[in-house]
Image (cartoon, rainbow, N blue to C red):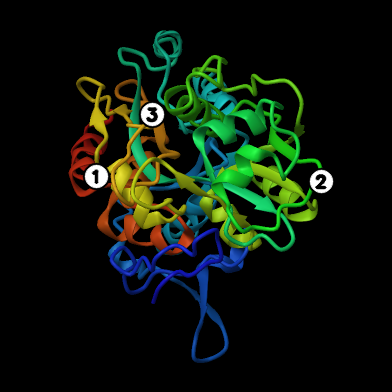
Amino acid sequence: MKLSRKNGLRASAIGALVVSGALVLSACGSDNNTETPAKDGDTKSSAAASSIACEGAKGQLLAAGSSAQKNAMDLWVKNFQAACSGVEINYQAIGSGGGITKFNQGQVAFAGSDSALKDEEVAESQKICKGGKGVNLPMVGGPIAIGYKLEGVDNLVLDASTIAKIFDNKITKWNDPAIAKLNPGAKLPASTIQAFHRSDESGTTQNLGKYLSTAAAADWKHDPKSKSWPAQGGQAANGSSGVATAVKDAEGSIGYFELSYATANKISTVAINTGAAAPVAASSENASKAIAAAKVKGTGSDLALSLDYATKAEGAYPIVLVTYEIACDKGNKAETLPTLKAFLNYTVSEEGQKVLADAGYAPLPAEIAAKVRTIVPTLS
């Protein structure tokens, strides 16, 4: 089975990443996304219950954060709860910034964030992680798609400079010469570009900013570390789902969100001219090529990664993010620790990673996943 989708250049099949037993994500956030019909007409979980080790998991586990990983989290939670009777994983997709805030206030067992903890956030976490600190555990990879809705234009190509100028309100018309140059022969209308961005604090926003600051430094002068939208103009929407819905509904629109939201909403996506031989489409396979080159910059139990946003490697999609699950290395609450470890052990397992490709995500590179698998059992 393979994941196919409409985008600028129609991304190449990602068969190399897709494995048997994974599911096609057909609707954002729907419980039905992770079910397949049974012979008797009922539904059953995509994961075999016997293959997930519950290891003392019980009760409720609260978590919050990145909306970019919500579709992956929905799959994981569905499978884990089907395997581990009596366990409830409650993940709130409130944005990376909100998740980190809740984690550092002791309200959740772990947070999802599309960017690693800042030094001050690590220091703050030591108040909650008694004798320890919050650590970054890579769990989900994937491309940040630049989605658009423009009638008659199915193969839109942009580069870092034009993307920066569009979101910074410097390019405001679809037939701008800079866009036309990248799309010879395309029938670009003279209509106004409707650019949408996140209204909430977001690691997706931060990763887009890091890309633009690196690949289009002359055109994007904003703080690349900001999780809040830093530019003037444009229209705001809450969460990746909100931006995706806004783009889907508005002709002449453009926005950014994790690829699974483009897939679920059938939104066309931009291919990026990186300077490689051909523009690179947003796909799990192309994102994996970029993520595989990431370097671990964290120390000890912290596995924060350094991504190369300026890559010109053939077929490497440069606007990528890695979502971390942030947990205490020491000082976790005793009542939730077994469930926390069992759940994270599943999500980083080969089985947990296999379900990602069909949902528009990029499974972690084998070397990085192996490192996470050695850290999770040591959480205490």
Image quadrant of residue 274?
top left
Query: What residue sits right under mark 1 in the picture?
Result: 369
Q: Nearer the viewer, residue 146 or 134?
A: 146
Pick the residue in front: 91 or 94.
94
Tell me the CA gap for discs 1 and 2: 46 Å
On the image, the x and y values in percent for residue 366 come to 20, 49
The crowding category of the residue bearing disc 2, from other C-alpha atoms within 10 Å (few below 14, some 14 to 19, many at least 20), is some
**Looking at the picture, which amino acid does disc 1 mark?**
Ala
The residue that appears at 63% across and 46% down in the rendered structure is: 180
Labels 3, 1: front one: 1
In the depicted structure, whether residue 223 falls above or below residue 277? above
Residue type for callout 2: Ser
**Residue 345 seen in this snapshot:** no
Count how many numbered circles sit on residues in the image: 3
Mark toward the start of the polypeptide (3 vs 2): 2
Q: Position of residue 86 (x, y in %)?
A: 48, 55
Amino acid type assigned to the residue bearing label 3 in the image: Ala
Location of residue 32 with respect to 43 vertically, above or below: above
For the question of whether residue 268 can be seen, the reply is yes
Q: Residue at x 57, y 60 (%)?
A: 263
Image spot of residue 123 (x, y percent):
40, 8
> Would you name the residue on which mark 2 appears?
191
| Residue labelled with disc 3 | 327
Which mark is nearer the camera, 3 or 2?
2
The reply, left or right, for residue 265 in relation to residue 120 is right
